[in-house]
Amino acid sequence: MAYRHTIKGKVYKFDDLRTLLAKASPYRSGDVLAGLNADSYEHRICAQMTLADVPLKNFLSEALIPYEEDEITRLIIDTHSAAAFDVISHLTVGGLRDWLLSDDVDGAVLTTLAPGFTPEIVAAVSKLMSNQDLIAVAKKCEVVTRFRNTIGLKGHFSTRLQPNHPTDDVKGIAASIIDGLLYGSGDAVIGINPATDSPAAVNSLLELIDYLRRQFDIPTQSCVLCHVTTTIGLINKNAPVDLTFQSIGGTERTNASFGVNLALLEEAYQATLSLNRGSVGNNVMYFETGQGSSLSADAHYGVDQQTCEVRAYAVARRFNPLLVNTVVGFIGPEYLYDGKQIIRAALEDHCCGKLLGLPMGVDVCYTNHAEADQDDMDNLLTLLGVAGCNFVMGIPGSDDIMLNYQSTSFHDALYLRKVLGLKPAPEFEQWLIKQGIFNQSGQLNHHHNPAKLLKAINYER
Amino acid sequence: MSDKPEKADQLQGDPWVSLKNFTAARIAIGRVGSSIPLRQMLNFKLAHAHARDAVYSKLDIDALSDALEEFNLPVYQLHSRAINREKYLTRPDYGRRLDETSVEALRDQVPVTISLVIADGLSAAAVNQYAVELLRLLIPKLVAANTGTLNISLAEQGRVAIADEIGQYFDAELSVILVGERPGLTAPDSMSAYLTYKPRVGLTDESRNCISNIRPDGLDIRPAADKLFYLISESLKRKLSGVELKDRHGLLSS
């Protein structure tokens, strides 16, 4: 249905919800590239005013991408909980924004409500929220997941140790892992982006991390971020797979461009669950997402990039993931141009994911052709720490020498923990103290002797 | 005296510096408190500054044109639809197509066998440094092997696919574009060469072959020229490019 709004005698008409959401989106280069953005500042705010008055019920009857054409739409509609939605069924999008910020709404309420949210409702309300609102609402949520440790507890903040190497050199990767562990990194996962997707190369990296984990009794999990079909093949060959990784998007065609669909993800999920390798829980999936992937795959159906992104979270929550990571600044300036756009997008992704009940982490990052630098990342990291983000990346000196982009360093996580009083996952913190890497007050131990851990570099298959 | 901070006290080195032998990653960089020491931070910022300068570097048309005279080939100065760097960065579609003036200049040109293109891509600094050097090695080989006629186009604010449109106007059998890569912190001056058989507007990456990381500390200019000559010869002989044109040259996989 069409929506209308009049400002100073000028009538703005929005043909449908999809158009209204796109025009209401805060400015970003990807929506301009797709030709979906508002034409003027007034046009955008007018769209936001219009959106504020739209009843949430409309989102249940008006699909942005047809049910018949897209399995993500079918997933969203078929798994929607009318019972959970009942609490907010009388609200408009604007009413929902105010209600979320009200003191009546706490983490417990939001946890119960999550199955009643659709991605489109969450995307819509986020477009009416300021950065401050996105932080305040996300902060209320607590999404806790478990495998060999407990991630996402209030007051805790974890990191993915990302020890990438341009040729997957096992010793090179081991060196970065050791460096990271000695800086207290790696409680979310030790996760490697392999340079090649060959099963043999992936397997040797899995064996490396598995060896380190067992040798030093580290309460964490490993992941090599290869294609899901490669992981399934490795599971069938009894490789030490803790978590299955996949990049996902918010439309069926986006996922097709990644070579996956819901059935394949279900197969991978069941295969990984069957390994039963978790010790304190069995959240076994690790997903990565990022605004712009649907446009990049020419699979966005005229839906703005932020709404496409939130639809990807519907895919993620189907499989009870341990970790969901929005790789916000990796895609490049044609989608998110500068620090301002990257920061806004990251806060949206984090808040929307949390509202949908996901264990959100953010790759606080940028490429060298984006108008961003370390100061922007410092800002974003701090904002996400305040917002209660579950985890960020830990990369030696912020410089990923394989993927050629900059993310957060081991030192960055220590900074955030120090200024905000945050701790690693409890099991991992105990390990760090036991190893002498951290002292009892959770700071790096000045007199730690790393000799034992350094011997790990002598690992041979 | 004792209240004055001493530099050595604040900076805590990491006793695992020997691990640096195994990776170029920024490991064992030490710390002040739990933060990155100033020298390490400045080194990082310098690498980023080089990368940023490379993104905004400009194709040195005068110097390149002068240098290209030695080949006695037709040289065309062209421009993409991206009028400046900002448009180039936000509109990839503009960087893949020629502007109107360039299109006019290319109407009714004599067909050519191989259309050679030099474009800035994301690092004009890379092609300013290495493009002519590579052509000095490549062109004599092509001439000696009688591969056919050649011309050269300089394309400002150009992406890889701009060679498709240029090649199409010349009705070329093959286009070869030398283009600056997205700068990393390790190397702000890496050049790539892409080769496309029967170039025409609308082709995508699976139609091409690529040689990347061309720079003295990566794939050096001479082996890059050898490899490119091999791919050109094979492409013309087998009348294809892309995934079906396997690299059997043995120097590097593309």
Image (cartoon, rainbow, N blue to C red):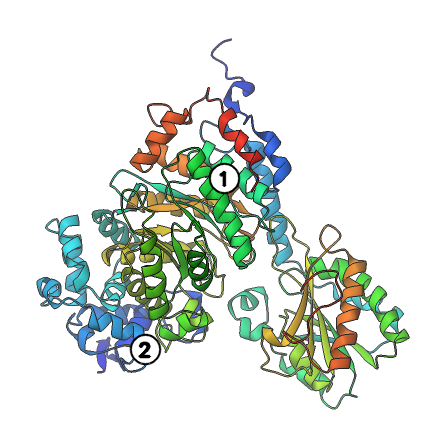
* Amino acid type for the residue under numbered disc 1: Ile
Q: In the drawing, does residue B112 fall left or right of residue A218?
A: right
- A340 vs B186, left or right, is left
Marks 2/1: CA–CA distance: 41 Å
Answer whether labels 2 and 1 touch (C-beta < 8 Å): no
Q: Which residue is mark 1?
A: A177
Q: Which amino acid does the dot numbered 2 rest on?
A: Asp
Q: Residue furthest top?
A: B1
Q: Is residue A457 above or below residue B237?
A: above
Image height of B180 relative to A39, above or below: above
Q: Judging from the image, what secondary structure is the residue with disc 2 in?
A: loop
How crowded is the residue under tag 1: few (<14 C-alpha within 10 Å), some, or many (20+)?
many
- Give the percent coordinates (x, y) of residue B154: 73, 72
Residue nearest the observer in this picture, A239 or A415: A239
Mark 2 vs mark 1: in front: 1
Q: Which residue is mark 2?
A: A70
Q: Give the side of residue A160 with respect to residue A106, left or right.
A: right
In the rendered image, the vertical position of residue A352 relative to residue B244, given as above or below? above
How far across and how far down the image is residue B238, in percent? 74, 81
Residue A351: x and y, percent? 28, 55
Q: Is residue B218 left or right of residue A447?
A: right
Quadrant showing the N terminus of chain A: bottom left
